Amino acid sequence: MPGNKNKEQVTQKLMFTIQEAVKHFGISEYSIRMGIRQGIYPAIKIGGKRGKYLIDSELFESTLRIEAIRNMKEFRKGEQNREKI
């Protein structure tokens, strides 16, 4: 029920700083920064030249899933090429 205060409401954080993403996803700060610079990970920069990046949690997680699938396909492709030799 909407007015029920006894139920604990769980809200998901929508945006992470790089440091928060490190803790939440278990990826190194260096990897996240390099992924942002290379255009792999989606992020927005706020605050000008010395500002900070904000990472959309859903987009970041989706990107990680896509990268994982891509890695699996490349691994399988490599395994198939080794079997032919």
Image (cartoon, grey):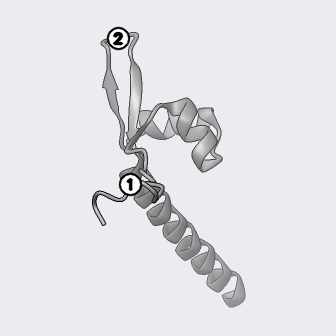
Check disc 2 and give the amino acid type.
Lys
Check disc 1 and give the amino acid type.
Glu
The circle drawn on residue 58 is 1
> CA–CA distance between discs 2 and 1?
25 Å
Res 3 → quadrant: bottom left
Is 59 placed left or right of 69 in the picture? left
Residue under numbered circle 2: 49
Is 15 placed left or right of 21 in the picture? left
Vertically, is 1 above or below 26?
Answer: below
Mark 2 vs 1: CB contact within 8 A? no
The circle drawn on residue 39 is none
First in residue order: circle 2 vs circle 1: 2
Residue occupying image coordinates x 40% and y 53%: 5
Assess disc 1: are there few (<14), some (14-19) or many (≥20) residues with their C-alpha within 10 Å of its C-alpha. few
Is 48 placed left or right of 38 in the picture? left
Residue occupying image coordinates x 28% and y 60%: 2
